[in-house]
Image (cartoon, helix red, strand yellow):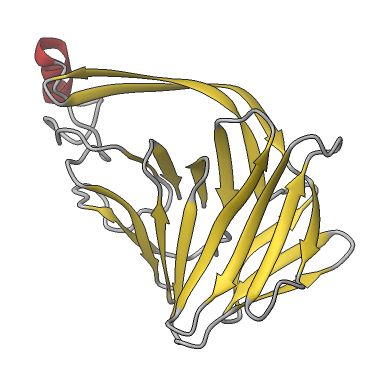
């Protein structure tokens, strides 16, 4: 599962109050766990963090939006270094490209209240896009995304987090939706909602909330 954005804050909640982040680090693989549940897995071939640049355009008419996002650059941050000397329940990982000129630092922290947080604490480079890949099992189900009208289980779909009119219809290929788009640009899609929320719960017993104020996409 992936999230596109920059300067995002993840709040992860485990089943047990005393859950905390742990990690294993070998020559080729970094794995982050929360309450023994694999949250993030990073290898050189499948990096957990990517960054880049893009230009988004938003066209609005009567509360309906046509959004396009052109990605001009996408860079895998394959290298990393771990700092686990920051105190109890705090872990910091800096991901970087081969030249070390582009860096993103993530801080993993756990509190006794059960609030487990992933924060972006530093970004080095001229960037306006970030992809953070949360590990998911093949049979995992996730639910949420605010008030959604099309799919209960969100796996296999992309959910832009952007408030707009629900629109007419839930499928851009249907005749009624095409007519609504043609006449008033009012056609809906499976993800359009006036109450999106970057929050989801997994049947693997964890809950995640993304605290972020700009356009982003939950890609399951």
* Image quadrant where residue 163 sits: top left
Looking at the image, which residue is at 52% across and 52% down? 1
Does 218 sit left or right of 24 as displayed? left
Viewer-proximal residue, 158 or 210? 210
Does 93 sit left or right of 172 as displayed? right
Looking at the image, which residue is at 11% across and 21% down? 62
Looking at the image, which residue is at 64% across and 56% down? 106
Relative to 173, say whether 143 is above or below.
below
Relative to 125, say whether 79 is above or below.
below
Residue 136 percent location from the top left of the image: 54, 61
* Image quadrant where residue 90 sits: bottom right
Looking at the image, which residue is at 62% across and 61% down? 107
* Image quadrant where residue 60 sits: top left
Residue 97 percent location from the top left of the image: 79, 39
Viewer-proximal residue, 125 or 31? 125
Residue 135 percent location from the top left of the image: 58, 60
All told, the count of numbered labels is 0
Residue 216 percent location from the top left of the image: 42, 39
Does 34 sit left or right of 171 as displayed? right
Which residue is the extreme one toward the top? 183
Does 164 sit left or right of 43 as displayed? left
């Amino acid at each position: 599962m992936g999230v596109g954005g920059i300067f995002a804050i993840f709040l992860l909640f485990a089943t047990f109050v005393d859950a905390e982040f742990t990690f294993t680090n070998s020559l080729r693989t970094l794995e982050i766990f929360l309450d023994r549940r694999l949250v993030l897995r990073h290898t050189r071939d499948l990096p957990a963090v990517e960054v880049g640049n893009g230009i988004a355009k938003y066209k609005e008419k009567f509360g309906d939006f046509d959004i396009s996002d052109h990605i001009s650059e996408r860079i895998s941050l394959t290298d990393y270094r771990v700092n686990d000397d920051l105190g109890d329940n705090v872990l910091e990982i800096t991901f970087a490209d081969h030249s070390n000129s582009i860096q993103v630092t993530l801080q993993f922290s756990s509190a006794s209240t059960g609030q487990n947080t992933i924060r972006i604490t530093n970004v080095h480079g001229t960037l306006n896009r970030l992809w953070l890949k949360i590990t998911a099992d093949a049979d995992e189900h996730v639910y949420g995304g605010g008030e959604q009208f099309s799919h209960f289980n969100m796996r296999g779909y992309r959910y832009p987090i952007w408030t707009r009119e629900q629109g007419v219809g839930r499928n851009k290929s249907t005749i009624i939706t095409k007519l609504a788009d043609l006449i008033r640009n009012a056609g809906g899609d499976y993800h359009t909602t006036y109450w999106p929320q970057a929050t989801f719960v997994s049947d693997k017993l964890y809950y995640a909330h993304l605290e972020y104020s700009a356009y982003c996409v939950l890609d399951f």
